[in-house]
Amino acid sequence: MPGYPVLPEGLAYGGDYNPEQWPEEVWREDVRLMREAGVTLVTVGVFNWGLIEPREGEYDFSRLDRILDLLHSAGVYADLATPTSSPPTWFRRRYPGSRLVDREGHVLGGGSRHSFCPSSPDYAAASERVVAALAARYAAHPAVAMWHVHNEYGWANAHCYCATSTEAFRAWLRERYGDVGALNAAWGTTFWGLTYGSFDEVEPPVAAPVGLLTGLQLDFMRFSVDAHIACFRRERDTIRRFSDLPVTTNFMIPNCKPMDYWRWAAEVDVVANDHYLDSARADPHIELAMAADLTRSVAGGRPWMLMEHSTGAVNWQPRNLAKRPGEMRRNTLAHVARGSDSAMFFQWRASRYGAEKFHSAMVPHAGTDSRIWRDVVALGADLRALAEVRGARVTAEVAVVWDWESYWALEFEWRPSADLRFRERIEAYYEALWREHVTVDFVHSSADLSPYRLVVAPSSYLLAEAAAKNLHLYVEAGGHLLVSYFSGIVDENDTIHPGPYPGALRDVLGVAVEEFHPLREHETVMLRSPGSPEVSQPAATGRIWSERVRLAGAEAVREFADGPDAGHPAVTRHDLGAGSAWYVSTALDGESGLRDLVAEVLDHAGVSRPRGLPDTLELVRRGDHLFLINHADAPVTVDGVTGAGVLDGAAYDGSATVPAGGVVVVRT
Ligand code: GAL
């Protein structure tokens, strides 16, 4: 298998390069500016299908030839993309059966990208042909360093409900279940008498009058992931006939809910990710850190590639905020700190026309006399200085459980409360850990947990029996587990585990839940120390959830002081074997109890972390390098830092001061 890294040295720096939108004089300026900024890798050809195959079976590679030659002459490598996420306009007309159909039955239009059915045999044949032609032509081109298959699988066409997809789904079910009786048992179709007599009676989960079978919905999600993976494999294996260079595709972790990236990870030579800040958030850099940690975890801890992020505003949010001074640098270096060996942007030069003309770029519409351009050049220098971190690993003592199937299942309709959202609890716990300066890995519940002192499961609604056993054994062997409410409720078919909740976790947690008592919107409940008439100091406050917990081996650590479960346990701990299992039965948040609880559990689990630092300082160790990223408006001094400053050339002897909004990287 081709290896990683893709470049002979250093961290890859660059972005999506779409020179087809510009006259050739501009290309010459582009490569001059790329050299000025220290760009080493650009993604080319992502949306070129209609340009390299203007008529079916007729290829014109002349423009791409000139672009690749020019890049090579400038010493810039190409991440050569297959153009299959944007089929040409002739394709749609020639193969109407390939059109994407949404769950309401609308046939979606052209004039855009991603408008095709992933199960279409016509799409399969046409995409394989163009990929073979591209790979044959450029496999030996000296500019090409790697292959970028497609673009963001499943982003806009995750699910197709056309007749072809329906047949493909039935075939997938036949393969999974063998006979329809097994499907009926798995989906629980005696409910509403929805028993299927044959696989041909199954329809995809199209718009229905009321709640759909959740087993049907889950399997359709799984089938759709497989449909996209099959498209990727077809292209990857076609490229392999001509080239040994690494092949990847750009994921959208964690912002493409329908794609199960644990399943995708094994398919690529290097994990690549696109990440954009959500400017509606108060502290968007915490979600960025979470995305980077999850990407590294999907990559199995190996270095990964940041394939796209932005120098400034995007164009597709309701309000597209520009990045503030220093923010782009902090963002990029946070990705590097958390394991990326590249810093790539969408895109090199801002478009003048089309849907994305208000998206920021490395070369903005304002040109080079601009803050963004100066920052891009300075970032190039930072990345050259950081070449030495390439390949280094990040290690973590704490893991957070993340399971896309649980994400899907939790958010189907008709749950006990509309406020039960998968990412809501994960992000709350992630933020508490981030503010405690604890770096985390993400894991699937069935993964090897032995490297971790603490495993946090904030949102594990769906938990297979075997995964629950894995957690149990982990605790018995000395691990510490922290679980939030509405976890371990159903199995992989969305069927409730037998007995009182949380069926799959009852034994390990040492509790039984008799009844759920979801709270009204904006309603809160107070927590106190058990048996104390007073509300604990500082007071903890819960939202969203309350429930009647009975102790069955665990002890109460906090109890509800009011609300439907006043006087009953709210937080419990079960000492089991050599470890402990904690359970939290309401939604605690940062300063209203979660930070304190997380700190208590971290201490109990013996997780080491720096103390006394502001919770706006991001601190990550990657190999021998300590990254200190200051998200506050005031400088911060960190004690216990000795080593060489990689970005500033300073010698740190016992402490380092990180300027307001600045970044210090120390080789320790
Ligand atoms: C990505 C996509 C790019 C561009 C970018 C804009 O999701 O891969 O092609 O559209 O978004 O933010």
Image (spheres, rainbow, N blue to C red):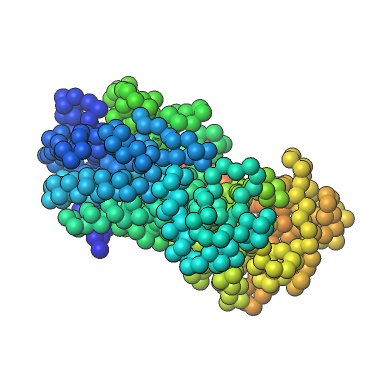
* Front position in the image: 96 or 238: 96
Farthest-out residue, right: 533
Quadrant assignment for ligand 1 = top left
**Residue at (76% x, 63% y) in the render:** 513
Residue 15 lies, in percent from the top left, at 30, 39
Location of residue 23 by image quarter: top left
353 left or right, relative to 497: left
In the image, residue 450 above or below residue 424: below
* Residue at the spot 25% in from the left edge and 27% down from the top edge: 21
Q: Position of residue 529 (x, y in %)?
A: 80, 58
Q: Single out the residue that lies furthest toward the front.
A: 197
Question: Quarter holding the C terminus?
Answer: bottom left
Q: Quadrant of the N terminus?
A: bottom left
* Left or right: 576 in relation to 238: right
Considering only vertical position in the picture, is 31 above or below 468? above
| Residue 207 in sight here | yes
- Judging depth in this view, the residue of 460 and 668 nearest the camera is 460
